[in-house]
Amino acid sequence: MTTHQPPQTIRANGIDICYEIFGNDNAEPLLLIMGLGAQMIHWDDAFCEQLAVHGFRVIRFDNRDIGKSSHLTGGKRLTPLELLKLRFLRIPVAATYKLIDMAKDTVGLMDALGIKSAHLVGASMGGMIAQEVTLSFPERVRSLTSIMSTTGNPRVPPPTREASAMLMAPPPRSKEEFIVRFGETWKVLRAGSFPEEEALDPDRAERVFARGLNPAGVGRQLRAVLASGSRKERLRGVKTPTLVIHGTVDPLVRPEGGKDTAESIPGAKLLMIDGMGHALPMRFWPDIIRAIDKHAHGAAAQAA
């Protein structure tokens, strides 16, 4: 039986970070970094428990500006005009903070928990943060797993029109509207028929809502991604064992984003999951968990 420590808050990199630990203290430390506007509970409890059973000390946490971690201030809502200027004129987007600051949050959390180095698993923006930690603090990373993420390379195809519209939609005004929007959003992101997931969406939405929403924070996170530019050239120098996982039908970070990540990092392994969109549905867990398990424990054995 693996242990489970309930959520706690700790001071790291000048902010409060809410985190939760699954697994035994002496197991291989594995940090799960979530994506844009997504609370740590988007790493499903059972997903974390299954990783813990495979011999990991699993740590999930709320990024800055989301959930129970510190909410910052400043910045305006992103406009379509700013996106057009960025895309066609390469005019940078203004941002309150960048991905490097979120990478420092991750390292700060490790410091606060007394973890010298860990396996990093990041999804979407979390993959970008994990890449940035690997680039800026390589000695802290035992292995990197980048899921449904990208390098920031502007040549990677943009999101589908439907996924883009969802990203730019104004925030819901009530709990009821939020629950409906949550279901609609994940239906778009999953890009397929997942009745077993849709049945759980209302409860998941309730849980997210209860932990607190921060639409302005999501806007600041989006600006952080857009203002951080491309990591592609820097990634060529990565020596950390790397696994890239991506869905073949991802509407938000297109499959080319995963392929570009794997091509940019020397020796990276690429796992394309047929029929997976921009989400981690339960039916794909066995493949994902098996791949992370093999990759991280393999890296640990090589380093020993």
Image: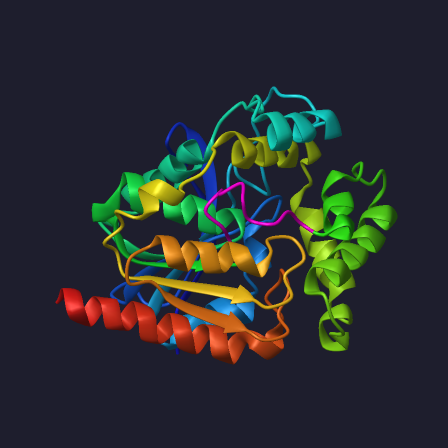
- Percent from the top left, x then y, of residue 68? 56, 41
Splitting the image into 4 quarters, where does residue 119 fall? bottom left
Q: How many marks overall?
A: 0
How is the structure coloured here? rainbow
Left or right for 216, reference 103: right
Magenta span contains residue 37: no
Left or right for 4, reference 220: left
- Percent from the top left, x then y, of residue 212? 67, 42
> What segment is highlighted magenta in the picture?
149-159
The vertical placement of 193 against 105, above or below, is below
Q: Which residue is drawn at 67% across and 36% down?
A: 214
Between residue 131 and residue 112, name the one nearer to us. 131
Left or right for 143, reference 205: left
Q: Quadrant of the C terminus?
A: bottom left
Is residue 31 at all visible to an observer of this figure? no
Is residue 197 at all visible to an observer of this figure? yes
- Percent from the top left, x then y, of residue 268? 33, 62
Q: Quadrant of the N terminus?
A: bottom left
- Magenta span: predominant SS is loop
Splitting the image into 4 quarters, where does residue 250 fall? bottom right
Q: Residue at x 42, y 62 (%)?
A: 244
Q: Which residue is drawn at 65% across and 66% down?
A: 249
Magenta span contains residue 155: yes
Between residue 78 and residue 120, name the one nearer to us. 78
Q: Residue at x 44, y 30 (%)?
A: 15
The vertical placement of 302 against 42, above or below, is below
